[in-house]
């Protein structure tokens, strides 16, 4: 009886081993076939993606990703297809898996930022795009995405600075200069930004960049109570952030709370602060205390960083007049008046600018105005553009 039981037990063990071996062999065989056919599976998915059959593209890659979860091309196609179907959280989860060592990382990072942007995760989208531009400093798409996101967050100054830096890396004049011109004459529209920002705050609450943008938008529209609430939240989220402290200090100073403005303006930095708005704020605080020489010293630093600002020049004219320097005050006032007129003309020219068929004379007019405004590098760029434009010859054919 015991022998029979041993035989039965041995038989079951042997059968189990055979079954397990068969499963392993079958799995390995299937995995090998999937790997061998991976190129054709990816081609099929790409074809479906081009045909906008996004679900089919993902279905083509499910088995491949099950066996090879880090197949970067499959991850990229799947993420892009999910993004196209507006399944942004799922797209983010997939695109996040593409490693920075992958050949698909550059395109994958742009797709990830797009999904984050559409999902209103603006803070993280900013972080992803900034790092991506550091890794791929010549990526036009990354730069344009980052510029658009900055504008959405009412960070026009940051968008302009970014474009200037990118242009200096070798972006062609025809691509960069019209965008820089557009930003030069563009007026922020907080009433358009607020619905987008409020929706982002509801969907993903307490994003520092969104909270600060809401504070800026409310302040620009004169909604002081709402602006103060957002600024206080922003300070709780990032108490040492430079821009948060600067905007809060400006806000409280404008409301007459000079003590809070002075406290917030005490910003510790290991390097010189190169933001003209900071020095102008210190100028206003010093002027409020009737420390005119100190105020003028701060204003000189602001003007060194941004010499084409009419507001600064008008402030300088006022300070110099109060200090008894009448000739200097007159010079500053005349310069402010001339800049205002030149900027007005630049706005008019920018509205007439035709990107598809630019006129050499038009480009030279823009160059002259930019030169008078102190933007010498851009002026030089517009002159280069004017020399490269081939005039459109009128046709001799009659209709």
Image (spheres, rainbow, N blue to C red):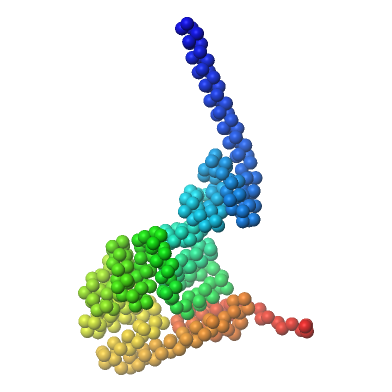
Instruction: Judge left or right: residue 385 versus residue 300.
Output: right
Instruction: Judge left or right: residue 34 versus residue 93.
Output: right
Q: Nearer the viewer, residue 272 or 84?
A: 84
Point 54% across, 68% down: residue: 171
Point 58% across, 36% down: residue: 31
Q: Nearer the viewer, residue 295 or 121?
A: 121
- What residue occupies the far right of the structure in this picture? 398
Is residue 368 visible in this depiction of the protein? no
Position in image of residue 16 (x %, y %): 52, 21
Position in image of residue 239 (x %, y %): 28, 63
Q: The C terminus lies in which quarter of the figure?
A: bottom right
> How many dots with numbers?
0
Point 28% across, 78% down: residue: 254
Q: Nearer the viewer, residue 204 or 383?
A: 204
Instruction: Judge left or right: residue 147 versus residue 40.
Output: left
Instruction: Judge left or right: residue 214 versus residue 99.
Output: left
Is residue 287 visible in this depiction of the protein? yes
Q: Nearer the viewer, residue 73 or 255?
A: 255
Point 35% across, 67% down: residue: 212
Position in image of residue 272 (x %, y %): 32, 70
Residue 234 lies in quadrant: bottom left
Answer above or below: position of 285 versus 46: below
């Amino acid at each position: 009886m015991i022998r029979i039981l041993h035989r039965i037990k041995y038989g079951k063990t042997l059968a189990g081993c055979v079954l397990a071996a068969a499963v392993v062999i079958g799995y390995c065989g299937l995995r090998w076939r999937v790997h061998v056919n991976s190129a054709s599976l990816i081609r099929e998915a790409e074809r479906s993606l081009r045909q906008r059959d996004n679900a089919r593209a993902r279905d083509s890659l499910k088995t491949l990703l099950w066996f090879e979860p880090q197949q970067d091309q499959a991850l990229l196609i799947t993420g892009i297809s999910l993004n196209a179907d507006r399944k942004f959280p799922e797209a983010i989860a997939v695109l996040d898996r593409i490693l920075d060592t992958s050949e698909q990382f550059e395109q994958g990072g742009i797709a990830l930022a797009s999904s984050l942007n559409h999902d209103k995760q603006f803070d993280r989208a900013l972080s992803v795009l900034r790092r991506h531009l550091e890794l791929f400093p010549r990526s036009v798409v990354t730069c344009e995405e980052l510029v658009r996101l900055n504008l959405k967050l009412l960070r026009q100054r940051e968008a302009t600075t970014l474009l200037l830096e990118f242009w200096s890396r070798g972006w062609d004049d025809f691509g960069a200069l019209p965008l820089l011109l557009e930003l030069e004459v563009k007026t922020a529209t907080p009433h358009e930004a607020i619905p987008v920002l409020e929706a982002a705050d509801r969907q993903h609450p307490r994003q520092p960049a969104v909270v600060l943008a809401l504070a800026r938008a409310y302040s620009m529209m004169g909604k002081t109570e709402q602006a103060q609430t957002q600024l206080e939240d922003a300070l709780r989220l990032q108490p040492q952030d430079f821009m948060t402290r600067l905007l809060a200090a400006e806000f409280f100073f404008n409301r007459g709370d000079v003590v809070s403005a002075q406290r917030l303006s005490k910003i510790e930095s290991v390097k010189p602060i190169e933001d003209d708005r900071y020095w102008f704020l210190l100028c206003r605080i010093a002027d409020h205390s009737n420390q005119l020489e100190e105020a003028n010293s701060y204003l000189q630093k602001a003007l060194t960083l941004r010499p084409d600002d009419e507001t600064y020049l008008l402030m300088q004219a006022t300070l110099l007049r109060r200090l008894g320097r009448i000739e200097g005050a007159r010079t500053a006032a005349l310069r402010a008046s001339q800049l205002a007129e030149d900027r007005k003309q630049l706005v008019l020219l920018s509205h007439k600018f035709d990107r598809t068929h630019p006129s050499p004379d038009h480009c030279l007019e823009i160059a002259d105005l930019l030169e008078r405004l102190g933007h010498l590098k851009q002026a030089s760029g517009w002159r280069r553009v004017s020399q490269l434009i081939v005039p459109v010859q009128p046709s001799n054919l009659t209709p």
